[in-house]
Amino acid sequence: MSETQTPTGDPGAASDAAPTTATAGANAPSAGAGGRRSLLPRITLLRHLLVLVVGAAVAVLLLESTELNTNIKLGNVAYLAIAAGGLTLLTGLSGQISLGHGALMAVGAYTTALMLDVERSEEPPSLALVFLAAVAATTLVGALVGVAAARLHGPYLAGATLALAVGLPGLALYFSDTFNGEQGLTIRPPERPEWFTETVEQLSGATGRGLNDKWVAYIAVACLLISYFFLANLMRSRMGRTWRAVRDQEVAAELAGISLGAWRVLAFVVSAAAAGLAGAVLAIVVQLAAPGSFLPVLSLSLLTAVVIGGLGTLTGALLGSALLVFLPPWLIDLGRDVFDMEEAQASQSSFVVYGLLLVVTMLFAPAGLVGTIRLALLRRRAARALTRSGRG
Amino acid sequence: MTEAHGSSAVGLSKAASGGGTATGTALLDVQGLSASYGPVRALDGVSLRAEAGRITAVLGANGAGKTTLLRTISGLVRPTAGRVVLDGQDITRAPVEAMVHKGMAHVPEGRGVIAELTVDENLRVGSLFRGKVGREEFDRVYDLFPRIAERRDNPAHTLSGGERQMLVIGRALLARPRVLLLDEPSLGLAPKIVAQIFGLVRQLVDSEGLSVLLVEQNARSALSVADTGVVLNLGRVVVTDDARTLAADEDLRHAYLGF
Amino acid sequence: MEQFISLTLGGVVNGSVYAAFALALVLIWRSTRIVNFAQGSMAAATTFIAVAVIDAGGSYWLALVVALLSGLVMGALIERVVIRPVEGGPELNAVIVTLGLFVAIQGIVALVAGVDERAFVPPFSTVGYEVREGFTLLSLSRNSIWTVGAVLVTMLALIALFRFTRLGLAMRASAFGQEVARLLGVRVGRMLTLGWALAAAVGALAGMLIAGDVSFIGPTFMDTLIVFGFVAAVLGGLDSPIGAVVGGLLLGLALNYVRGYLDDSLLGMAALVILVVVLLVRPGGLFSTTAARRA
C-alpha cells in the first residue's frame, strides 16, 4: 500500500482532504511524497488522521487504566506538550528560540481564568468559547512579540524573550485589581456532562469525586491531540517547507520571493497560539492562574522538553514533556529516601537534571537529534564544500 | 621541468647566513603533503622546497589547493599524509601557535588585519610571543611602510586594501620569521600597489635572507618577482621550475595560469 | 524634587550593579561571541560560597576574595569543559548550553543551600546620609558608595588591562581575530579561558554587591539581574566595557524612575521595552559608530 502511488480508495480520500488542507494554506498531496517506508497511507492528512485516531484510542486506554493521580499528571503532560509542540515548530522549523513561551502561556491561562473566575456568579461561557478566546488573546500578544522577534536572532532573541518571561508576570501584580496579584485567580472547574459520567462508568467503572478531574484530563488530552494534528499537518505542508527554507537558506529563500520577516512572524504566531491553548488547559487542570506558575523556569523547562526530545519533532516534544512531569516525583523520592533531603530541596534536583540534560544533549548528541540538527550539519557540510570550491 | 634550486648563488649565500642551512637543503621542505575536507581530497601528495633568500611562488587556478597548502603547512588544517620540515625539524604535528616560535609566519588570505585594533596594536600582536620588543623594530617596519606609519593610532578597519596588506606583512615581519607564507597578497589590489608590495617583498628577501612561499592566482605578477614557480592543479603539483622558464612556457600558461 | 534626587542616586547605585553584570557578559561576548545566560546562576553560586565563608567566621572581605577566586575557577572550568565544544558552532547550541548551565547551577545551589532566602549583611552601613534636617537620602549610604566605587574601580582595572598590558592585547587579539592570533603565536584557547574566568570573577563581584544592596540572597535572586545585565550590555553594544557601564547606569536610572513613579512590578516589562526599542532602533547599541551589528 505504501509502495504504489494509487491504491484504490486513496484518490477519493485525497479529494476529501483538499478543503481542509487548503485552509491551512497547505498542499498536502505533494507534502507527503517523502516515500517513507511504512504501512501508513501516503497522503499526509490521511496518515495524520489515522495517527490521531490511534492516539485517541491510546489516550482513552491510558486514562482509563491508570489512577486518578496519574490522570492529573497526564493532564499536566498534555498542556506542557501543547506548548512544547508550538515551541518545536518555532525552534525546530523556523530556527528561532523563545524563552518567553511560559509568559505566553500565562496570557492564555489568565484569559481563561478571567472567564471562568469562581467569583463570577453568572453561568460561565462554554469551554470551547473560553479556549478560543484564550488562543485569540495569546495569538495577538504572540503577533506583537513575533514582529519584534523576527528581526532578532540567536542570543539577542533568547535575551529578549527571557526578558518577556521575567517581565510579563509583573503585569499581573501591577493590575492586581483584575488579576488578584500574587494569589492569582481561582478557576471554577468545568462541569462534566452526564454522558461522560455514564460512559466512564461503563468503560472502567470509575465513579465519585475524581470524575471531575478525569473529565479535565480528557479535555486536556483532547486538546493535545487536536493541536498536534494541526501542528503536524502544518509542519508537513508547504508552509513547513517554507519555514525550513527560511531557517536554512535565508538568502535563497529571499531570492525566491519569500518574505523572511513575515514567515518568522507567522511561525511565532502559530506557536503562540499553541502556548495560549496550553495556558488555557493549564488553567483548568491546576484550577489557578497565578504569577508563580509562570516563572522563567517554566519557559526553560519547555525548552528542555523540546531540546532533549529532539528539536523539530512533535513526538520528541511529547516525550520531553512527559519527562518533565514524571521525572521530578521520581527524583524527589530518590532525594528523600536515599539522600535524606527535604522535599522542597529534593525537588530542585530535577532542575539540575534538566540543565545537565540540556548541556549534555548539545555537547554529545546534537547530531543524534532529529530535525534541525541533522539539517544544520548537512548545511554546514554544504557550506564547507562551497568554501572549498571557492578557494585555491 | 628540472629542479630549480642552485641556479641562484645569491640565494644560497643568504641561506647560509640566515639559518645555518647547508647548501642544497631547503629551509622549508614539504614532502608528500595530503589533506582532505571530509571526503574531498584538497591536497594530494604535494612536495615542494622553499629556500632561504628565495621566493617560491605557488600558482594555480581557483580550487587548485593553494590556500589549503599554506593552511596545512602552518597547522590550521591537519594533513592526512606527508611531512613538513622546517630547517631540519619536523613540524608536521606542531600546534598552530608554535609556528611563529619555529620561525614561520603565515599571512592569511583576505588581509588578516584585526579590524577592531589600531594599526600599532596590530603590529604589537605580531611581536607578542617574543616578549618585550624594542621600539626600534616597530620604527623599522614603519620606515618600510610610511603609509601605515601615518595611521598608527587609527583602527585598522579604516585602512585601504593596500595599507592592510602592508600592515599584515609588517606584522608578520615583527615575528622575525625565516619563512614567510603569503596568501594572495594581490587579491583585490590595484596593479600599481601590487607591484609596490611585491617589490618590497623582493627587497626583504634579498636583504634579510628570508624565504617566501607566495601563493598567488595572479601568476604573471607572481612569476615576475619569484625565483621558482610551483604550479598546482586539483591538489597536485603539475610542474616545478624556474620562474622565468615557467613564464616563458606558453602552453603551461594557457593551461594552468590563465595569461 | 527630593524624590527625584533620591531616585536618581538610587538609580546610579542599582545601575552600577547592572553595569558590573553587563561587564561580565561583555567580557564573554567579546571573546567567544556567546551570551552567558548562566552568569546569574554562577554569581548566585559564588555568593553562596561567600556566605559559607562568613558563616564559618570569616570576614566580609575574606568572603569577597573567596567569591572572586571561586568565580575565576568556575568560569575557567566551565569554558574548558562545556563551552569549548560549542564555540564557533551554531549559535543556538551555545545559547542552549548556557541556558542549561543556568538551570543546572541554580538547581545545585538550591540543592546544597536550600530554597529559602536568607539575610546577607552588607559590609557598610545602609543607612542613608542625612543631607539636612528632615531630608535623608535613603539611597545614598556608605554601602552604596562602596558598591558604585567597586564597580568603577573594576571597570578602570579592566580597561587598563586591555589597553596597556600585553596580556590584554593578546586577549583582544584572540577575541577579534582568533585565527590570525593563533598564527601569530597567541595561545587563543588560554585567552578564551582567561576571558571566561575574568568574567565570572566580575560576575561574582556583582553578586556580592547586589546581595549587599538588597540584604538577602536566594538561589534565584539573580534571575532578574541576568535580564537587566543583558539589557544594559545590549544598550552599550555588547562589545564595549565602557558601553556596558554606561548602559548599566542608564538602565539603573530608567528602572529606578519606573520603580519610584510607577511600580516595582513593572521593572521587568520596562526592561523589556527598553531592550526591544534599542534592538529595533539601534541594534549596535546606543554608542555604535561602526556599522551596526546585526542583532
Image: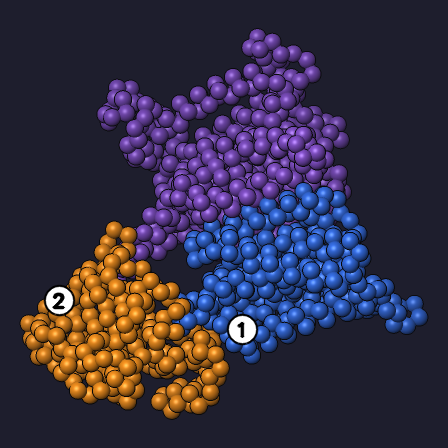
Q: Residue at x 45, y 67 (%)?
A: C187
Say if residue A267 shows up in the picture: no
Tag 2: residue type?
Val
Which one is in front, B42 or A325?
B42
Q: Residue at left 68%, top 72%?
A: C152
Query: What shade does chain C have?
Result: blue
Residue at 92%, 67% in the rendered image:
C134
Colour in which the image shows chain B: orange
Please say if A240 is above or below C35: above
Q: Position of residue A206 (x, y in %)?
A: 62, 12
Horizontally, is C133 left or right of C72 in the view?
Answer: right
Mark 1: amino acid:
Gly
Where residue C218 appears, x then y in whole percent? 72, 49
Instruction: Give the quarter of the figure containing the C terminus of chain B.
Output: bottom left
What residue is pinned by disc 1? Answer: C168
Write down the residue under mark 2: B238
Q: How is the image coloured?
A: by chain
- Name the image quarter holding residue B250: bottom left
- For the colour purple, the matching chain is A
In the displayed orientation, state which residue is furthest to the right: C133
